[in-house]
Image: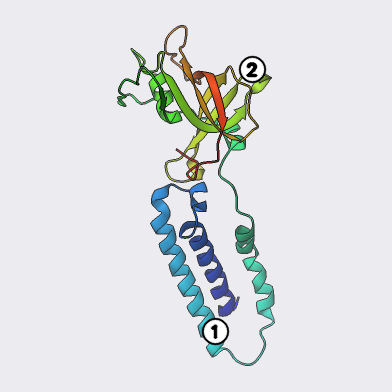
């Protein structure tokens, strides 16, 4: 591969990183918000190095034509594919294939919820409150949860889901709440669900069981800019 081709690939990579991190929020489909400065810095460095390499090659190359560089440009095809086809954030497909379960926090302490009105909670906090060992703060309280819809098996209920990541999409874990009392929205559609927690009849189970919510209202919403918890 010629220096010009190497520089062009670096330039495209750098420009791609900058376009998804500095000039848009597309990077949130792959990593947590805290990684933005690193992505912007890496994109700027790659773009500058690529530009310098291209300029140096243009100034120093001989008049002879480099036929090999045409073939070498094929190596840049994956980079251009990434630019033209942006993978979306993880959704129902990934959630169905997640075999893990959220770790139940033993130390998280949540205060009591308001007796009247609706309190908006993340799915993670809702699950933690549902598994409180005693005096569950969710009992009789109306809450509002946001996530995307994943139809359940058998059509009896559906799951309100959101993916949780620690670092990037590679370590994503599905947070799920089974919704009853409302028809299932279209798969992967983002909704806000208002309702009340359905307690387990025999108390908190020893093994992980997806908490349930009796829905009173389901409203379609736009996908949040930050899709992960």
Q: Nearer the viewer, mark 2 or mark 1?
A: 2
Q: Position of residue 213 (x, y in %)?
A: 51, 19
- Decide: few, some or many residues near mark 2? Use Cα within 10 Å; few <14, some 14-19, many ≥20: some
Quarter of the picture holding the C terminus: top left
Q: Position of residue 223 (x, y in %)?
A: 54, 41
Q: Can residue 209 be seen in the rendering of this structure?
A: no
According to the image, label 2 marks what residue? 156
Within the image, what quadrant is residue 81 found in?
A: bottom right
Q: Position of residue 94 (x, y in %)?
A: 58, 37
Q: Can residue 96 be seen in the rendering of this structure?
A: yes
Residue shown at the point (41%, 17%) measured from the top left: 141
- Decide: few, some or many residues near mark 1? Use Cα within 10 Å; few <14, some 14-19, many ≥20: some
Secondary structure state at the residue bearing disc 2: loop
Q: Position of residue 211 (x, y in %)?
A: 49, 19
Residue toward you, 180 or 101: 180
Tell me the distance, in whole angstroms, between the alpha carbons under discs 2 and 1: 65 Å
Where is 154 relative to 94, above or below? Answer: above
Residue shown at the point (47%, 44%) measured from the top left: 226
Q: Are marks 2 and 1 in contact (CB under 8 Å)?
A: no
Sequence-wise first label, 2 or 1: 1
Residue shown at the point (60%, 50%) measured from the top left: 87
According to the image, label 1 marks what residue? 57
Residue 21 image label = none
């Amino acid at each position: 591969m010629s220096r010009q081709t190497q520089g062009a690939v670096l330039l495209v990579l750098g420009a791609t990183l900058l376009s998804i991190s500095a000039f848009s929020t597309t990077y949130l489909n792959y990593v947590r918000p805290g990684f933005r400065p690193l992505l912007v810095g890496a994109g700027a460095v790659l773009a500058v190095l690529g530009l310098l390499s291209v300029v140096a090659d243009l100034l120093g190359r001989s008049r002879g034509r480099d036929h090999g560089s045409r073939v070498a440009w094929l190596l840049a095809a994956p980079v251009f594919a990434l630019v033209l086809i942006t993978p979306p954030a993880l959704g129902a497909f990934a959630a169905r294939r997640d075999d893990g379960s959220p770790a139940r926090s033993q130390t998280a302490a949540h205060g009591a919820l308001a007796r009247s009105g609706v309190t908006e909670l993340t799915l993670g906090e809702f699950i933690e409150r549902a598994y409180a060992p005693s005096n569950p703060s969710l009992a009789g309280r109306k809450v509002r949860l946001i996530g995307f819809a994943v139809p359940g098996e058998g059509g009896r209920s559906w799951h309100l889901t959101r993916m949780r990541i620690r670092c990037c999409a590679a370590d994503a874990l599905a947070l799920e709440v089974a919704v009853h009392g409302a028809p299932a929205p279209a798969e992967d559609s983002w909704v806000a669900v208002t309702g009340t927690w359905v307690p387990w009849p025999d108390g908190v189970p020893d093994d992980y069981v997806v908490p349930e919510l009796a829905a009173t209202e389901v409203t379609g919403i736009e996908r949040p800019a930050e899709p992960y918890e």
